[in-house]
Image: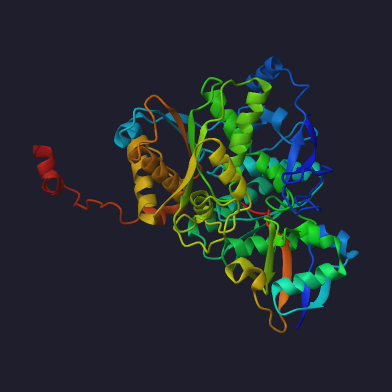
Amino acid sequence: MSIESLKCKECGTAYELDASYVCENCFGPLEVAYDFSALDPVEVKRRIQAGSQGIWRYADFLPFEGRPGDPLEPGLTPLLRADRLAERLGVEAELWIKNDAANPTHSFKDRVVAVAVAKARELGFETVACASTGNLANAVAAHAAAAGLDSYVFVPANLEEQKLLATGVYGTNLVGVRGNYDDVNRLCTQLAESRPWAFVNVNLRPYYAEGSKTLAYETAEQLGWELPDRVVCPIASGSLFTKLGRGFQEWLDLGLLSGAQPIFNGAQAEGCSPVATAFAEGWDVCKPQKPETIAKSLAIGDPADGPYAVEHARRTGGGVDSVTDAEIRDGIKLLAETTGIFTETAGGVTVGVLKKLAARGEIGAGERVVVYITGEGLKTLDATRDTFQMHEIDPDLESFEAEFHQEVAA
Amino acid sequence: MTVTVKIPTQLRAATGGQSEVEVSGSTVGEVLDAVFDAHGDLRERITQDGDLRRFVNVYVSGEDIRFQQGLETGISDGDEVTILPAVAGG
């Protein structure tokens, strides 16, 4: 495998490949460094195409000493043309939806967790844990159960009921913390110091984050080994957004793809928009916020990769926008009505921002745009409550005719 | 005002392995300066040009100082100052 070391993203100091995530010299985040020079692109492509029907087909680009395994392999989710959505938005673009709700626990988090849990096993951990806004909780509980590891899942206690139920069912130690996500995260950062656990998004974060690159590889492979011109992607911590960019770049550098990085458009909820604010203000740090939004899966007020997300949006000529709760609800409905895909609030945020870009005329004719839908609508049912009416009738023909008379006559 | 400053694992090489340091000061800035006086290596690791580096979080009794007055945030008796990496989560 091509894995080389952990390396500080800020100052470049190299570290051993163990469960650490912070540079001791400058406190910057550690990232996995590889040496891909021994890879032959033709052979790699053949290996991928003959590989498993999931993310392990990209094992050459993942942070393992040996071949990774996971009984609950995520990935190869559908990439669907969305012509009816393009029409509704009034754009003549080639619009695609990457529906990553079609993963084992119905969000993109299965990708990062599969990688983190496989790495936890490689490093000899027996317990995995996480700080989560919900989707990660589902994924950690499920993948730990499948791998036969113990798990501790920490979430804000006021999380959507669906996400709590879909976590507890796997038999994890579910801990509801009276506070917001950033409080949960601080607690887990402190716990990670004393517990011999693999916190997937704390001490294993450098490996965990690598799982997001598989979304870039899949997109390119499903587009016939080509790049999109533009991507629209939600931003919580900013990790998915920046790793998508890294995934595309690795394949560009290796010659598996030609062209340039797509334009990156990030999407945040107005009630938690530290990255959008930093982008708009031209800052290179994100000022933390206290989240107040229905998009709880994106409600990270102090985003770890925020500065890098801002940099990547700038570098690719893109941007970071935010939308209101009302626009989030509209986005969920618009996607459902035009594509048949029911997304959670994070997807509503992403579609809301896509709509904004379209309205501003930023999406050019013929542009190939990929929109990342990262989670499932059934997990945030409250967001669709009262957005439509049911016709209630008696079980007879007259009752139906009376209700629908005008429609039938027309 | 004497306060306890919690040192994260990643910085303990600079404090001779100590996980807590007792110092005095009336603001976060003064408290950190006192910590740096005792453990010189720490200054460069977590600050740059007089400001905290961008991946350093400091809390006073659990509350992020960026929601307060930053390094000017006042310290009361019994407060606990915690330094933590800002690179977790998500």
In this picture, is A179 found above or below A78? below
Question: Which image quarter is the N terminus of chain A in?
Answer: top right
Q: Camera-side residue: A28 or A147?
A: A28
Residue B79 seen in this snapshot: yes
Please give the name of the residue rendered at 39% of the width and 36% of the height, measured from the top-left corner. Answer: A362
Question: Which image quarter is the C terminus of chain A in?
Answer: top left
Please give the name of the residue rendered at 54% of the width and 40% of the height, measured from the top-left corner. Answer: A314
Q: Position of residue B19 (x, y in %)?
A: 83, 68
In this picture, is A401 found above or below B56? above
Q: Position of residue A81 (x, y in %)?
A: 41, 28
Residue A75 seen in this snapshot: no
Q: Camera-side residue: A408 or A334?
A: A334
For residue A339, what is the image quadrant? top left
Would you say B39 lies left or right of A216 here? right
Q: Camera-side residue: B18 or A214?
A: B18
Would you say A213 lies left or right of A78 here? right
Please give the name of the residue rendered at 54% of the width and 44% of the height, measured from the top-left corner. Answer: A107
Q: Residue furthest left?
A: A409
Q: Residue furthest right?
A: B16
Coloring scheme used: rainbow
